[in-house]
Image (cartoon, rainbow, N blue to C red):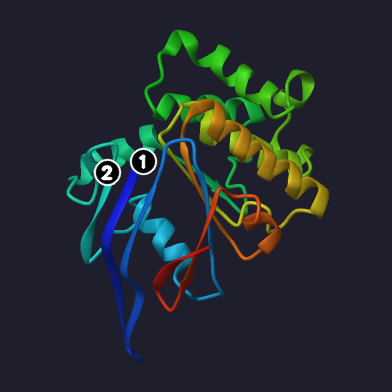
Amino acid sequence: MLKVDNLNKTFHTAAGDVHAVRNVSFNADNGEMVAIIGASGSGKSTLLALLGLLDAPDKGSIDLDGVELANLDSGGRTKYRSSQVGFVFQQFNLIPNLSARENVLLALEYSHWPKADRARRADEMLALVGLDGEKSRRRPARLSGGEQQRVAIARAFAAQPQLILADEPTGSLDKSTGQKIVALLRSAASTQGATVLVVTHDEKVASQADRRLEIDDGVLAEIA
Protein backbone atom coordinates (compact mmCIF):
# COMPACT_ATOMS: atom_id res chain seq x y z
CA MET A 1 0.00 0.00 0.00
CA LEU A 2 1.09 3.54 -0.77
CA LYS A 3 0.57 6.02 2.07
CA VAL A 4 1.26 9.71 1.49
CA ASP A 5 1.02 12.09 4.43
CA ASN A 6 1.27 15.88 4.51
CA LEU A 7 3.48 16.13 1.40
CA ASN A 8 4.70 19.62 0.50
CA LYS A 9 6.86 21.08 -2.26
CA THR A 10 7.62 24.76 -2.88
CA PHE A 11 9.73 26.16 -5.70
CA HIS A 12 11.51 29.45 -5.06
CA THR A 13 11.60 31.62 -8.16
CA ALA A 14 12.52 35.20 -8.99
CA ALA A 15 8.81 35.95 -9.27
CA GLY A 16 8.11 34.50 -5.84
CA ASP A 17 7.38 31.16 -4.19
CA VAL A 18 5.32 28.57 -6.09
CA HIS A 19 3.53 26.14 -3.76
CA ALA A 20 3.27 23.21 -6.18
CA VAL A 21 2.12 20.59 -3.66
CA ARG A 22 0.34 21.57 -0.46
CA ASN A 23 -0.30 19.20 2.47
CA VAL A 24 -1.17 16.27 0.20
CA SER A 25 -2.34 13.10 1.97
CA PHE A 26 -3.88 9.95 0.46
CA ASN A 27 -3.64 6.16 0.40
CA ALA A 28 -3.71 3.77 -2.56
CA ASP A 29 -3.99 -0.01 -2.31
CA ASN A 30 -1.98 -2.66 -4.11
CA GLY A 31 -3.74 -3.57 -7.37
CA GLU A 32 -5.63 -0.27 -7.42
CA MET A 33 -5.60 2.20 -10.30
CA VAL A 34 -5.99 5.81 -9.17
CA ALA A 35 -6.42 8.75 -11.54
CA ILE A 36 -5.08 12.19 -10.62
CA ILE A 37 -6.67 14.96 -12.63
CA GLY A 38 -6.17 18.71 -12.72
CA ALA A 39 -5.49 21.65 -14.97
CA SER A 40 -2.07 22.48 -16.37
CA GLY A 41 0.13 23.85 -13.60
CA SER A 42 -2.04 22.41 -10.84
CA GLY A 43 0.77 20.26 -9.40
CA LYS A 44 0.05 16.88 -11.04
CA SER A 45 3.48 16.26 -12.52
CA THR A 46 5.27 17.62 -9.44
CA LEU A 47 3.35 15.17 -7.26
CA LEU A 48 4.29 12.29 -9.56
CA ALA A 49 7.95 13.35 -9.49
CA LEU A 50 7.89 13.35 -5.68
CA LEU A 51 6.32 9.89 -5.53
CA GLY A 52 8.89 8.55 -7.99
CA LEU A 53 11.75 10.18 -6.05
CA LEU A 54 12.73 12.25 -9.06
CA ASP A 55 12.45 15.21 -6.69
CA ALA A 56 12.51 15.55 -2.91
CA PRO A 57 9.63 16.94 -0.82
CA ASP A 58 10.18 19.85 1.55
CA LYS A 59 8.29 17.91 4.19
CA GLY A 60 5.90 14.99 4.52
CA SER A 61 6.18 11.23 4.21
CA ILE A 62 5.83 8.65 1.42
CA ASP A 63 5.40 5.08 2.70
CA LEU A 64 5.36 2.14 0.29
CA ASP A 65 4.56 -1.19 1.93
CA GLY A 66 6.14 -0.08 5.19
CA VAL A 67 9.25 1.60 3.74
CA GLU A 68 9.57 5.36 4.31
CA LEU A 69 10.84 6.64 0.98
CA ALA A 70 11.41 10.30 1.72
CA ASN A 71 14.20 9.39 4.17
CA LEU A 72 16.24 7.26 1.76
CA ASP A 73 19.76 8.38 0.93
CA SER A 74 20.92 8.89 -2.66
CA GLY A 75 21.85 5.24 -3.17
CA GLY A 76 18.59 4.06 -1.65
CA ARG A 77 16.59 6.40 -3.86
CA THR A 78 18.34 5.12 -7.00
CA LYS A 79 17.74 1.49 -5.99
CA TYR A 80 14.09 2.25 -5.22
CA ARG A 81 13.50 3.91 -8.59
CA SER A 82 15.08 1.06 -10.54
CA SER A 83 13.44 -1.82 -8.67
CA GLN A 84 10.18 -0.59 -7.17
CA VAL A 85 8.87 2.07 -9.59
CA GLY A 86 7.78 1.76 -13.20
CA PHE A 87 7.46 5.00 -15.17
CA VAL A 88 5.23 5.50 -18.22
CA PHE A 89 5.74 8.88 -19.89
CA GLN A 90 3.68 10.68 -22.53
CA GLN A 91 6.71 10.88 -24.83
CA PHE A 92 7.62 7.17 -24.32
CA ASN A 93 11.33 7.86 -23.51
CA LEU A 94 12.54 4.74 -25.29
CA ILE A 95 16.22 4.45 -26.23
CA PRO A 96 16.17 4.96 -30.01
CA ASN A 97 19.11 2.75 -30.96
CA LEU A 98 17.76 -0.26 -29.05
CA SER A 99 15.01 -2.61 -30.20
CA ALA A 100 11.76 -2.94 -28.26
CA ARG A 101 13.09 -6.13 -26.67
CA GLU A 102 16.41 -4.51 -25.79
CA ASN A 103 14.62 -1.57 -24.12
CA VAL A 104 12.77 -3.99 -21.85
CA LEU A 105 15.92 -6.05 -21.21
CA LEU A 106 17.79 -2.91 -20.15
CA ALA A 107 15.12 -2.08 -17.57
CA LEU A 108 15.45 -5.61 -16.17
CA GLU A 109 19.23 -5.20 -15.98
CA TYR A 110 18.93 -1.94 -14.05
CA SER A 111 16.47 -3.55 -11.63
CA HIS A 112 18.89 -6.44 -11.03
CA TRP A 113 16.37 -9.01 -12.27
CA PRO A 114 18.07 -12.47 -12.32
CA LYS A 115 20.19 -12.57 -15.47
CA ALA A 116 19.07 -16.06 -16.47
CA ASP A 117 15.42 -14.97 -16.48
CA ARG A 118 15.66 -11.60 -18.25
CA ALA A 119 15.12 -12.83 -21.83
CA ARG A 120 12.11 -14.92 -20.83
CA ARG A 121 10.60 -12.05 -18.86
CA ALA A 122 11.12 -9.50 -21.66
CA ASP A 123 9.48 -11.80 -24.20
CA GLU A 124 6.63 -12.49 -21.80
CA MET A 125 5.91 -8.81 -21.24
CA LEU A 126 6.10 -7.88 -24.93
CA ALA A 127 3.71 -10.71 -25.74
CA LEU A 128 1.34 -9.36 -23.08
CA VAL A 129 1.18 -6.00 -24.88
CA GLY A 130 0.91 -7.61 -28.32
CA LEU A 131 4.45 -6.96 -29.54
CA ASP A 132 5.98 -10.40 -29.71
CA GLY A 133 7.76 -11.87 -32.72
CA GLU A 134 9.20 -9.61 -35.40
CA LYS A 135 7.92 -6.36 -33.86
CA SER A 136 9.91 -6.97 -30.69
CA ARG A 137 13.08 -6.68 -32.79
CA ARG A 138 12.15 -3.29 -34.26
CA ARG A 139 13.67 -0.05 -33.04
CA PRO A 140 11.25 2.68 -31.84
CA ALA A 141 11.39 4.59 -35.16
CA ARG A 142 9.83 1.58 -36.89
CA LEU A 143 6.94 1.36 -34.42
CA SER A 144 3.77 3.45 -34.31
CA GLY A 145 3.09 5.79 -31.38
CA GLY A 146 0.72 3.29 -29.83
CA GLU A 147 3.25 0.48 -30.22
CA GLN A 148 5.97 2.59 -28.61
CA GLN A 149 3.70 3.28 -25.67
CA ARG A 150 3.04 -0.44 -25.33
CA VAL A 151 6.81 -1.02 -25.21
CA ALA A 152 6.99 1.62 -22.47
CA ILE A 153 4.30 -0.23 -20.51
CA ALA A 154 6.07 -3.57 -20.97
CA ARG A 155 9.26 -1.91 -19.72
CA ALA A 156 7.48 -0.33 -16.75
CA PHE A 157 5.91 -3.59 -15.59
CA ALA A 158 8.77 -5.96 -16.46
CA ALA A 159 10.51 -5.98 -13.06
CA GLN A 160 7.18 -6.26 -11.19
CA PRO A 161 7.49 -2.90 -9.40
CA GLN A 162 5.19 -2.07 -6.52
CA LEU A 163 4.32 1.34 -7.94
CA ILE A 164 3.50 2.41 -11.52
CA LEU A 165 3.49 6.14 -12.30
CA ALA A 166 1.95 7.09 -15.66
CA ASP A 167 2.13 10.74 -16.73
CA GLU A 168 -0.46 11.48 -19.45
CA PRO A 169 0.10 8.02 -21.01
CA THR A 170 -2.58 8.55 -23.68
CA GLY A 171 -1.97 12.24 -24.36
CA SER A 172 -0.30 11.78 -27.76
CA LEU A 173 -2.37 8.80 -28.93
CA ASP A 174 -5.57 8.43 -30.92
CA LYS A 175 -8.75 7.44 -29.06
CA SER A 176 -8.70 3.76 -29.95
CA THR A 177 -5.04 3.28 -29.05
CA GLY A 178 -5.49 5.30 -25.86
CA GLN A 179 -8.27 2.98 -24.74
CA LYS A 180 -6.03 -0.03 -25.30
CA ILE A 181 -3.26 1.57 -23.24
CA VAL A 182 -5.61 2.21 -20.31
CA ALA A 183 -6.87 -1.38 -20.54
CA LEU A 184 -3.26 -2.60 -20.40
CA LEU A 185 -2.55 -0.50 -17.31
CA ARG A 186 -5.63 -1.86 -15.56
CA SER A 187 -4.91 -5.44 -16.56
CA ALA A 188 -1.27 -5.33 -15.52
CA ALA A 189 -2.18 -3.76 -12.18
CA SER A 190 -4.69 -6.50 -11.42
CA THR A 191 -2.38 -9.33 -12.48
CA GLN A 192 0.75 -8.01 -10.76
CA GLY A 193 -0.85 -6.31 -7.77
CA ALA A 194 0.96 -3.02 -8.34
CA THR A 195 -0.44 0.36 -7.36
CA VAL A 196 -1.02 2.41 -10.53
CA LEU A 197 -1.27 6.21 -10.45
CA VAL A 198 -2.29 7.84 -13.73
CA VAL A 199 -1.95 11.59 -14.15
CA THR A 200 -4.36 12.71 -16.87
CA HIS A 201 -6.42 15.63 -18.09
CA ASP A 202 -8.73 13.23 -19.95
CA GLU A 203 -11.99 12.59 -18.07
CA LYS A 204 -12.63 9.43 -20.10
CA VAL A 205 -9.34 7.97 -18.92
CA ALA A 206 -9.99 9.07 -15.33
CA SER A 207 -13.45 7.51 -15.33
CA GLN A 208 -11.90 4.07 -15.87
CA ALA A 209 -9.84 4.25 -12.68
CA ASP A 210 -10.97 2.72 -9.40
CA ARG A 211 -10.77 6.15 -7.78
CA ARG A 212 -10.28 9.72 -8.90
CA LEU A 213 -8.35 12.45 -7.13
CA GLU A 214 -8.26 16.07 -8.23
CA ILE A 215 -5.41 18.48 -7.59
CA ASP A 216 -5.97 22.23 -7.77
CA ASP A 217 -3.25 24.75 -6.90
CA GLY A 218 -1.32 21.97 -5.18
CA VAL A 219 -4.23 20.81 -3.01
CA LEU A 220 -5.50 17.23 -3.51
CA ALA A 221 -9.06 16.08 -2.92
CA GLU A 222 -10.97 12.89 -3.69
CA ILE A 223 -13.84 12.99 -6.18
CA ALA A 224 -16.86 10.96 -5.07
Where, by quadrant of the figure, is residue 221 drawn? bottom left
Q: Is 117 located above or below residue 19 in the figure?
A: above
Q: Going 28% across and 63% down the picture, which residue do you hit? A: 7
- Per the image, label 1 sits on a secondary structure element best described as helix
Read off the residue under disc 1. 81
Q: Position of residue 3 (x, y in %)?
A: 31, 49
Q: Position of residue 204 (x, y in %)?
A: 71, 58
Q: Position of residue 175 (x, y in %)?
A: 80, 54
Q: Which mark is residue 77?
A: 2
Q: Name, please, the residue furthest toward the top.
A: 116
Between 151 and 202, the one lying in front of the other is: 202
Q: Going 63% across and 41% down the picture, which residue do you hit? A: 96
Q: Is residue 151 left or right of residue 13?
A: right
* Type of amino acid at the residue the image marks with label 1: Arg
Where, by quadrant of the figure, is residue 79 drawn? top left
Check whether the beta carbons of the residues at disc 2 and disc 1 lie within 8 A of each other.
yes
